[in-house]
Amino acid sequence: MDSLAPKAKVPRDGKWSEIESSDLIPGDMVAFKIGDVVPADCHLTGAIKFSIDQAALTSESLPVNKKTGDQCFLGSTRKQGEAEGVIIATGANTFGRAASLVGQDDDTTGHLQKIFAQIGSLCLVSIGLFVLLKIVVSRPRFQYSYRRSLDNILVLLIGGILIAMPTVLSVILAVRAQQLAKHKTPVTRITTIEELAGVTILSFDKTGTLTTNKLMIDEEVVKTYGPFAPQDVILLAAYTSCTKNQDAIDQCNQAPRL
């Protein structure tokens, strides 16, 4: 966290001073100046034309306007305006903690593993019932010897265990992974192909995955209502743009066209 916001401006002993962001606690009052990174999740108590860049959290290009009563999250960068706020969460309790959860190991049982466990349980129960039936019926009724009964029980045990099922399933999933690769969909774990069938809600970040997080102007959809052509309007917009302030719209005006 210190690498994101090593300093934070807070009131101490009746005056504003800078402290390490790691020393912040919920309830501290903080102030933001241009270029500051939000040191922790906070609730704005005052804001004047305040906007922040949340690209580190949402990957969106445009700054987000904030007003009094809104919340700012750890990792956001102040773009313009002034604001003060009260710290409401720090460290692992912040909104940005979701990033740290991505790399954590997931010990939950997958959908495919649950199916294997159910099939295995069914096979064990079925084998147990047949073995019990064999012991109860074969000896008293048919007067089979213990050796013959034991041979039949071994046949039930060997035939009831699905040894080839994991191998066959792995081959099928490998073929599916190859088919997905032809459609430019890499598969890191082949078991996820089957596990995806159990998904009820799929959430993903479109920016940077489905999109490139870059604003561009499409000249074909630009409409003008005066004597100027779309190319003239785009050219004038580029002349009035300033890229040194890192504004997404200004950079878009000077970027290559679609």
Image (cartoon, rainbow, N blue to C red):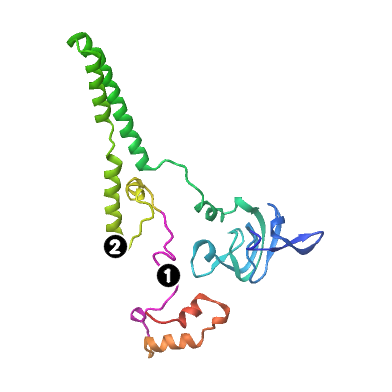
Q: Which residue is mark 1?
A: 212
Residue drawn 34% across and 45% down?
198
Q: Which is in the foreground here, disc 1 or disc 2?
A: 2
Which residue is at 46% across, 88% downward? 236
* Residue located farthest toward the bottom when viewing the structure as drawn: 227
Find out whether residue 218 is within the magenta segment: yes
Q: Position of residue 204 (x, y in %)?
A: 42, 57
User: Over which residues does the magenta segment extend?
Assistant: 203-225
Quarter of the C terminus within the rendering: bottom left
Q: Quadrant of residue 32?
A: bottom right
Judging from the image, what secondary structure is the residue with disc 1 in?
Answer: loop
Q: Left of 152 or right of it: where is 86?
A: right
Compared to residue 245, the image places residue 207 above or below, namely above
The residue nearer to you, when weighing 22 against 74, is 22
**Is 114 situated left or right of 253 in this image?**
left
Of residues 169 and 27, the one nearer the viewer is 169
What SS does tag 2 mark?
A: loop
Rendered image quadrant of residue 256: bottom left
Q: Amino acid at mark 2?
A: His
Which secondary structure is most common in the magenta stretch?
A: loop
How far from the left and from the top, in percent, is residue 3?
64, 63
Position of residue 206 measured from the top left corner of the image (x, y, whole percent): 41, 62
Q: Which residue is mark 2?
A: 183
Looking at the image, do the residues carrying marks 1 and 2 touch, with CB atoms under 8 Å apart? no
* Amino acid at pointer 1: Thr
- At horizontal 71% and vertical 58% (from top left) the residue drawn is 29
> As drawn, which residue projects farthest toward the right?
13
Q: Residues within 10 Å of mark 1 (few under 14, many from 20)?
A: few
